[in-house]
């Protein structure tokens, strides 16, 4: 009935002592105007209710989508944290294995060095009992063995230091990854974009 005007008309029987027809017609027109006004207000309220209902449904859909995104982000943070912890454990295990390997290498190097020194001392004892010329040759041999021992220890030390430096670099990469993840927390997206 939108836009239609309700015009009330009524025929009343005439009587000698009845109501004034002008007053009755005027009253009927006023009632028609009021009914028209109420009808327009009702239609406007119904349209407003439809609009608000549509907005509420849209807001509910948006809220549901945001909640799903929030859950996905929370799950992603959990996965990232688990990966970070696993990486830290792996690095710690690698460090421990490197320490064990270093200790074993150093023990082996000491045993070898002790054997070399013992052999050199045995040879030196035999040489001392021989002529002076053999003694000088034996001392030269001991010096050569000592140089070989020093070179071996130096080579092992450089190898071990290089392995430790490599492990340190891997730990730095994990720390930078953790810093990038922390920068991507909600409310700090501009840091995440800058880190990317």
Image: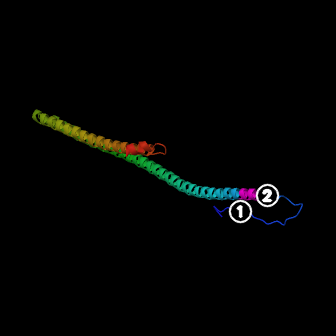
Q: x%, y% of residue 133? A: 10, 34
Label 2: which secondary element:
helix
To which residue does mark 2 refer? Answer: 22
In this rendering, is residue 190 above or below 57?
above
* The N terminus, quarter of image: bottom right
Q: Is residue 169 visible?
A: yes
Q: Nearer the viewer, residue 131 or 62?
A: 62
Q: Residue at x 40, y 45 (%)?
A: 193
Q: Nearer the viewer, mark 2 or mark 1?
A: 2
134 or 19, which is in the foreground? 19
Marks 2 and 1 close (CB-CB < 8 Å)? no
Label 1 secondary element = loop
Identify the residue at horizontal 39%, vertical 47% (top origin).
Answer: 91
Please identify the residue farthest to the left as the structure is shown.
133
Question: Which residues fall within the magenta stretch?
Answer: 23-35
In the picture of the structure, the residue carrying the numbered disc 1 is: 7
């Amino acid at each position: 009935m939108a836009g239609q005007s309700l015009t009330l008309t009524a025929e009343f029987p005439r009587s000698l002592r009845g109501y004034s027809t002008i007053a009755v017609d005027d009253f009927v027109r006023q009632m028609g105007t009021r009914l028209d006004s109420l009808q327009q207000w009702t239609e406007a309220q119904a349209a407003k209710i439809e609009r608000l209902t549509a907005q509420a449904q849209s807001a509910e859909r948006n809220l549901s989508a945001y909640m799903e995104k929030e859950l996905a982000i929370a799950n992603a943070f959990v996965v990232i944290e688990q990966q970070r912890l696993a990486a830290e454990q792996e690095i710690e295990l690698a460090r421990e294995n490197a320490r064990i390997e270093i200790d074993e290498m150093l023990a082996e190097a000491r045993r070898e060095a002790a054997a070399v020194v013992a052999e050199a001392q045995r040879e030196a004892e035999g040489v001392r009992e021989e002529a002076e010329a053999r003694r000088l040759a034996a001392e030269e041999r001991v010096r050569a063995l000592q140089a070989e021992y020093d070179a071996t220890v130096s080579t092992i030390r450089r190898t071990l230091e290089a392995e430790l430096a490599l492990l340190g670099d891997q730990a730095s990469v994990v720390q930078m990854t953790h810093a990038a993840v922390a920068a991507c927390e909600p409310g700090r997206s501009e840091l995440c974009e800058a880190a990317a």
